[in-house]
Each structure stands twice: as C-alpha cells, then as structure tokens.
Amino acid sequence: MVEREYDYIKGSTVSAPERKSSVRRPNKKYKQIQRRKNIQNKNIILRKIRKNDRKYVFTVAVVIFSLGLITITGDIKVYNMQNGVSNLNAQITQTQEENEALKVKLVKSSSLKNIQEKATSKLAMSIPNKEETVRIDFSQNYFENIKSNSSNNSSNNSTKGSNLFSKLMDLVK
C-alpha cells in the first residue's frame, strides 16, 4: 500500500491542499516569549543578588556602627575617669595646702612669746618675782613614807595639771 501524505480530506483540496508537517517550526511569538522569560528570569536573579548585596552592605554598616558606638562609649568612660582623677588630685593639693596653713598657724600659736602674751592679756597672769618663786630640790626623795597615798594624789594632780594645760591650749586656739 502506498502511504498517503494526507490522513483525511475535508471537501475539495484542489485549491489549497494542506499538508501536515512532522517537524514544527517555532513561531516567532514563541521565541519572543521565551526570550522575555529568560530576560525576566535574569532580572529576577539580578534583583535577588542586588537584594542580597544590600543586606550584606546593611549588615556591614550595622556592625561598623555598633563597633563605633562601643569605642565611643569606652572613650567616654575613660574621659569620665580622667576627670574624676584630676578632681581628686585637685582636692588632694587643696587639702595639703590647708594642712600646711594649719601647721604654720600651730607653730605661731605654740611659740613661747605668743603663749606668754595670751597668758598675760587674757588670763591676767604675771611673771613671778624672786620672792614669789619657790625652789624645790627633787634630787632627794621627801615622800618616802607616802607611797600608797602618792599614787592616788598623783593621779588627782595629773588630772588637775592636764585640765590647766587644756585650758591654756583652748585659750591659745
């Protein structure tokens, strides 16, 4: 049997015979659609790459910014500590100057001349004459018999002496 080129015939085929082709030629529209799809896919991939690049740049910027903040915070702490140290040094020098001034005042107040002036002017004391003075020789022990009573008396005398001395020092100040 002879193979026919046509499987079926509809009506008259004399004027325009149609043949079925076994190989299809791609349409121009199909090629254009495929090109557009390829271009769109490339654009989508490029957008994703750009988006990832932006994320990477943003992440790097955030890391740099946070490291900068940490550095600045550390510098601020160091600056505050340095201010505290300089304030403490200023207070130390001021206190040392005050101590020196007090030492000078103490030396002035404790001089014999100053004590004598205060005693004569404020306490109305006077320098005793030769007739008013009493001399005692402490090389001999005049109080041998009174050893037990001497401890009681000496404690009372020492408190009286210290009271007199403290009164003198209060007047000097």
Image: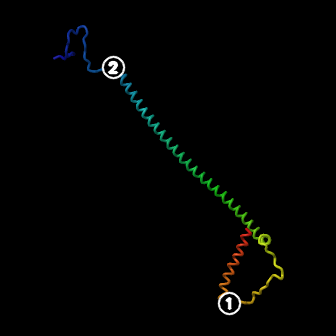
Mark 1, residues whose alpha carbon is within 10 Å: few (<14), some, or many (≥20)? few
How many marks on residues? 2
Front position among marks 1 and 2: 1
Q: Which residue is mark 2?
A: 27
Of residues 33 and 90, the one drawn nearer to the viewer in this rendering: 90
Q: Residue at x 46, y 38 (%)?
A: 55
Against 73, residue 35 (above or below) is above
Front residue of this view, candidates 106 and 27: 106
Foreground residue, 40 or 35? 40
Say left or right for 122 vs 9: right
Query: Disc 1 or 2, which lies upstream in sequence?
Result: 2
Quadrant (top left/top right/bottom left/bottom right) for the C terminus: bottom right
Q: Nearer the viewer, residue 140 or 173?
A: 173
The three-letter code of the residue at mark 1 reads Ile
Q: Position of residue 4 (x, y in %)?
A: 20, 16
**Which residue extends farthest top?**
15
Q: How is the image coloured?
A: rainbow
Give the structural element (helix, strand or loop) at label 1. Answer: loop
Q: Quadrant of residue 49?
A: top left
Query: Could you say which quadrant of the image residue 149 lies in?
Result: bottom right
Q: Are marks 1 and 2 in contact (CB under 8 Å)?
A: no
Position of residue 154 in the picture relative to residue 115 (left or right): left
Residue that lies at the very extreme toward the right in this rendered image: 130
